[in-house]
Image (cartoon, rainbow, N blue to C red):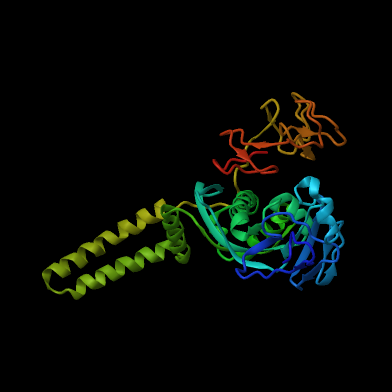
Amino acid sequence: MGVDNLILLENLEWFDESGQELLHRLPEQGSGEIKFGAQLTVRESQAAVMYYKGKACDAFGPGRHTLKTGNIPILTKILSAPWGMKSPLRAEVYFVNLKVFTDLKWGTRDPVAFRDAELGLVRLRAHGVFNIRVIQPVLFINTLAGTMGKYSTEQVEEYLKRVIVSRLNDFLGEKLKTLFDLPGTFDELATGLQKRLANDFVRFGLALDALYITSITPPQEVQEAIDDRSRLSVIQDMDKFVRMKAAMAMEKAAESGGEAGAGLGLGMGMMMPGMFGNLQAATPKTTNEEKAAPVHCQECAHPIAVDARFCPYCGHQQVVLKQCANCDKNLTPGARFCPRCGHPADEKPAVSICPHCNTDNLPGATFCNQCGQKIV
């Protein structure tokens, strides 16, 4: 490359042989005395950023470019004698790979907590793949790569996996009520999760090009409960189903022949009226009218009318227009501060700490990764 020589100019270019490098620095050993007139060749799938005197001075797109620095061949070596024959005008070029990096794996290292509306607290495991690409080279270098000579997908994949899993827990808590609604919704969940993660990637100069959910797996006992419910949903009339099973049992007993078979069939015939009577008695009768649950004031816990707008005991507003982000008290329209805790109405808590188990979560998290309880 001609670095640190007297006469030769540099010809800078880079090829990614591994297919996994996001960034590569030239000179590889650190900064160098890139001379005035050095040539830089950038491919269509690349971008180059030149750092001169410690600052990003220019970015280059595809093509051949002539670099301009204060390092003049021969003259710079003579003038750099006080610095051990090394020019203080240091320069380096970072090549950034702009291609889409595909088939990066993400998954839950430990099961995440999900509060199912029908099954209660369930521990889920989820897996999938995602694609990323660099969209802001300078921001990517300054926030992730720093002064590293090489930066590959392996170095950023582990962190991005944890971000995806954390956001997945929040997203499932908001969009999914029960695991029984999960089949057929993977694409919808993946699309929504990708939009939720966009800001987490952009602040590093990255774009989440695609995200796919390949599996969301509950524990074995929960899977068995789902299978049992699926079997029951196939049976439209339990009364007819039991009668059919009893008739089939009688038929098999009669086919077995002999006095034993005849006696068994007779006994089953005598038992059937009692079986069907008990079944019908045990079947709950449904009505179209359901008793309304009592309503209590959230502030003083006194019983109030269902359609009440204000509590007649304490005057607490019952129509939820806006709630305090700190204590969940219902706020009146235009309120700037919470009358209960004094927290600003438009300000959200700076951190997301679970009030149930004190676990730290990502900023803006609404469900705890540890216990599955709602945070805000």
- Residue 194, by quadrant, is bottom right
Camera-side residue: 186 or 56? Answer: 56
Residue 298 is situated, as x and y percent measured from the top left of the image, at 69, 31
Image coordinates of residue 288 in percent, x first then y, are: 59, 52
On the image, the x and y values in percent for residue 167 come to: 64, 50
Residue 5 left/right relative to 36: left
- Closest to the observer: 122 or 70? 70
Q: Residue at image x 88%, y 35%?
A: 334
- Asked if one can make out residue 203 in the rendered structure from this viewpoint, the answer is no
Q: Quadrant of residue 59?
A: bottom right
Is residue 186 visible in this depiction of the protein?
yes
Residue that extends furthest to the left in the rendered view of this protein: 259
Q: Is residue 263 above or below residue 124?
A: below
**Quarter residue 136 falls in:** bottom right
Work out whether residue 81 or residue 23 is closer to the camera in this orientation and state it. Answer: 81
Q: How many marks?
A: 0
For the C terminus, give its image quadrant.
top right
> Where is residue 310 drawn, in percent x and y?
78, 31
